[in-house]
Image: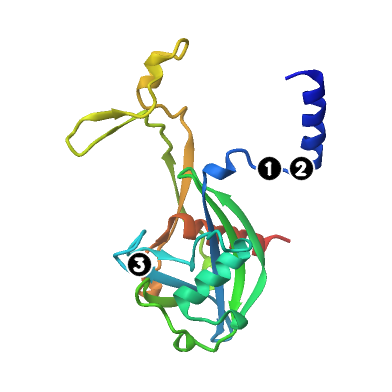
Amino acid sequence: MDKYELAIFKKRLNQESSYLLGYEDFLKTGICILLLWQEDEYHFVFQKRTMHISQGGEICFPGGKKDPTDVDFLDTVLRETEEEMGILQSKLEVIGPLGTLVTPAGIFVESFIVVAKVSSLEEMNINSEEVEFAFTIPVSYFVQNEPLVYNINIEMQPFEIDDQGKAKVLFPAKDFLGIPRSYTQPWSRNHKYPIYVYPLNPFQQETLWGLTAQLVYEFVKKLKKK
């Protein structure tokens, strides 16, 4: 790089908007925080995923991977919600973005708050290929009940064990000059990551946890903010 190249580089940097480095390496998803008005208050609409798809059997919001044909993440959210929950996009009122969540698992999540302009779950034509069933929980329940929080260790694994029980090296630290041998073994630097958990026993439903519970927590936190 010479002085001219640096000057051009500087100009380009100042013209670009803020950019998340490594963005192209993340799995990009859009999540719909779906609300439904019933029994004189708003409820979250959750789904239980069918067992034969990814994250099978888990409780979550509608959403999924951003397709190349999607204009933006909101397009992803509306498309996925229509596909999974059977609600026409014309009956989805977008309230606004909740925010962006980046997980240690390499998932980039854009979330949007959306109201289903239907009177009940019975008006939704739920896709049984992806959704086992849907149910609602009042937003007020989460406002009144704090989640349980468990801080787990995040660990870097420089190798993995294959089906034959043999170690497959993912990062050959010992092959490079100056990289300490300690990096041939798992390391973490004592980094913790919170796992949010909401027991749903009062509603005879299974536990809400992980990414979905974290989005609910962030929603409630913003709702309570003065």
Mark 3 sits on what residue?
206
> Residue 133 sits in which quadrant?
bottom left
Mark 2 sits on what residue?
16
- Residue 158: image location, x then y, percent: 37, 28
> How many other residues sit within 10 Å of disc 2, few (<14), some (14-19) or many (≥20)?
few
- Residue 107: image location, x then y, percent: 50, 49
Residue at horizontal 54 percent and vertical 89 percent from the top:
119
Alpha-carbon span between mark 2 and mark 3: 45 Å
> Residue 3 sits in which quadrant?
top right
- Residue 226: image location, x then y, percent: 73, 61
- Residue 118: image location, x then y, percent: 56, 87
Q: Nearer the viewer, mark 2 or mark 3?
A: 2
Alpha-carbon span between mark 1 and mark 2: 8 Å
Tag 1: amino acid = Tyr
Q: Are marks 1 and 2 in contact (CB under 8 Å)?
A: yes
Tag 2: amino acid = Glu
Q: Does 111 sit above or below residue 90?
A: above
Quarter of the image with the N terminus in it: top right
Residue at horizontal 62 percent and vertical 59 percent from the top:
221
Mark 1 sits on what residue?
19
Q: Nearer the viewer, mark 1 or mark 3?
A: 1
Can the viewer see residue 143? no
Q: Nearer the viewer, residue 96 or 78?
A: 78
Counting residues from the start of the chain, the first of labels 2 and 3 encountered is 2
Judging from the image, what secondary structure is the residue with disc 2 in?
loop
> How many other residues sit within 10 Å of disc 1, few (<14), some (14-19) or many (≥20)?
few
Q: Does 138 sit above or below residue 179?
A: below
Can the viewer see residue 28? yes
In the rendering, which numbered label is found on residue 120? Answer: none
